[in-house]
Image (cartoon, helix red, strand yellow):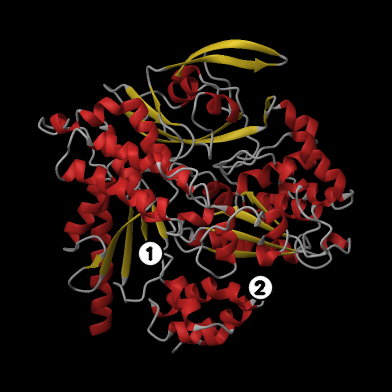
Amino acid sequence: MSAPAQTRIIFQHIDEPGYTNDLACYVRHGGYEVLKSAVRRKPEELIDEVKKSGLRGRGGAGFPCGVKWGLVDRKSGKPIYLIVNADESEPGTFKDRYIIHQDPHQLIEGTMISCFANNVKQAYIYIRGEMPHGARILEKAIAEARAAGFVGPNILGTGYSCELFVHRGAGAYICGEETGLIESLEGKRANPRIKPPYFPAVLGLYQCPTIVNNVETLCHVKYIAQHGGAAFSQIGTPGNTGTRIFCVSGLVQRPGYYEFPAGKITLGQLLYDVCGGPLPGRTFKAVIPGGSSAKILRFGERFKGKRKVGAELVDYDWGVEDVPMDFDSLGMIGTMGGSGGVIVMDDSVNMVEALANINAFYAHESCGQCTPCREGSLWMKRITTRMVHGTARAEDAALLQGVADQIPGRTICAFGEACSWPTQSFMAKFGDEFRAYPETKKTPKPAEAAPLI
Amino acid sequence: MNLQPATLQRIDEVITHYPEKRSATLPLLHLIQEDVGHLPADTETWVAEKLGLQPINVYEVVTFYPMFRRQPIGRRHIKVCRTLSCALLGGYKTCETFEQEFNTKAGHTSPDGEVTVEFVECLASCGTAPVVLIDDDLHEKVDCAKAKQLSAQIKAEAAQKKVARSG
């Protein structure tokens, strides 16, 4: 079965010749019309539409956006803040970059609709430090929107006011974690907060109720406000509604960004039909389907079980190629849809070296607050790096497994899981390769293999 | 602290973006670093005074975030992405090429003080790997040949500036 056509909602104008990132162009394409009608509706009505839509957060966890908004403490009398999480830093993910650079007003419109719906008076876009041009583009776009009455005091003459500012990060991955991001926005080290009690919906920025949403999620809110939650829920599959942007990178013919209805395309269709399959003379070996912390899949393995289709339970028996790309299906086979970053590896890649690369990333990015993560991520890096550049021992596999198993569930934030899942899944799927590595090292590497650590 | 009037103006403006001044710590550090090139020794006390904090509050932020630097770097700053998607497409060789071209090691500055080469974590452009950030500009699909070409361009620009300075 060949792949379905792309459904470009958020990426409708990305790479469109002649489409520019200024206000005039956005307005020419119908921009801010949705905000104009949204501010004349009841805020609760907009929240209901988002709940009806089934929209799930696109940052990684897939938490329902409407539920997140529903949890916001509206009785405390404290101001409610909204933060756009544009920290985009999960390796393999690069969708927000294009929205910010090429269609910033789409994000601003989605943000302002969300602010209005939640009675937010002050919002921030937290953009990662390594996107200096992105920050400038957003600042310019916000200034244009403010001048036109879409942002700032008395928006569109309704009496509703909301400020929006850009806040730049400074190179720390952990700022993508929402409570770490909040600490960072407060001017501190981005050490995530413990939950409970610090659920952002209740005790977020400045100890006030706070909504943190991903860039892609907020763009979807604009679509939902325009077409209704029911229409949005018709795209994709039940429980996995709307479109999803997949960022494909690594060893594949046509890497890039592709927007499809969630769950309507399989991993095989995405990698073979859309991305053109493996490089000439190679075969796919492994794929990480949802950002580098997602558990790896091995081509050739099979997944069996029962799943719900409508009200019925049906058997499934999938190869990696058959898995529908949605939160639930990827969750069922033991990995996750995460941030939509699909990293592809072929038969030229040695898995010990690939894991060493990932481990070096997480060791560098651990905030250092919790001992299991701070020490564990460093140990995993040191073991795998030594295996590649120093002495590899057959017992290293068991040692790695032992370290990885002691991290998850013992840390303040999900970084503990994020840094141990790669090691745990590489061990589960490619344990043989780790045990055999002392022998493998004695033979010359394939000429086409790039150094990974 | 010797900052340009425009920087001082932006500093005063950015503080108004937040209900609590402390939030302006990162923006102030960015502005100072953009102006001076790095964060000079009196940064912590200066920012602390500006925001009503203790210098330690600023120091702990400076030392946490990889982008802040307390030492000067070269006139040009090359950041090569090290993370998996870029490495799979040859990021390590790209970094090595820049090291050779500027006779330095990652994390260091060329002997003539012109160029600092760094090997950094994911730059969020994995689909066009390997990627390199030179100053504020992203360069995509930088294989060894393109790394050499970019190096030549940087060297030519440096030579031109040198002539302009001596002339």
Residue B164 drawn at (x, y percent)? 28, 80
Q: Nearer the viewer, residue A264 or A326?
A: A326
**Is B43 rendered above or below residue B117?**
below
Residue B118 drawn at (x, y percent)? 30, 60
Mark 2 against mark 1, which lies toward the viewer?
2
How many neighbours does mark 2 have within 10 angstroms: few (below 14), some (14-19), or many (20 or more)? some
Indicate the chain on which mark 1 is placed.
Answer: B
Q: Is residue B86 visible?
A: no
Q: Which residue is mark 2?
A: B17
Return the mark for residue B20: none
| Residue B12 position by quadrant | bottom right
Residue A359 drawn at (x, y percent)? 34, 45
Check the picture and name the quadrant holding the C terminus of chain A.
top left
Q: Which residue is mark 1?
A: B135
Q: Which comes before the other along the chain, label 2 or label 1?
A: 2
Judging from the image, what secondary structure is the residue with disc 2 in?
A: loop
**Residue at 72%, 63% in the rendered image:** A208
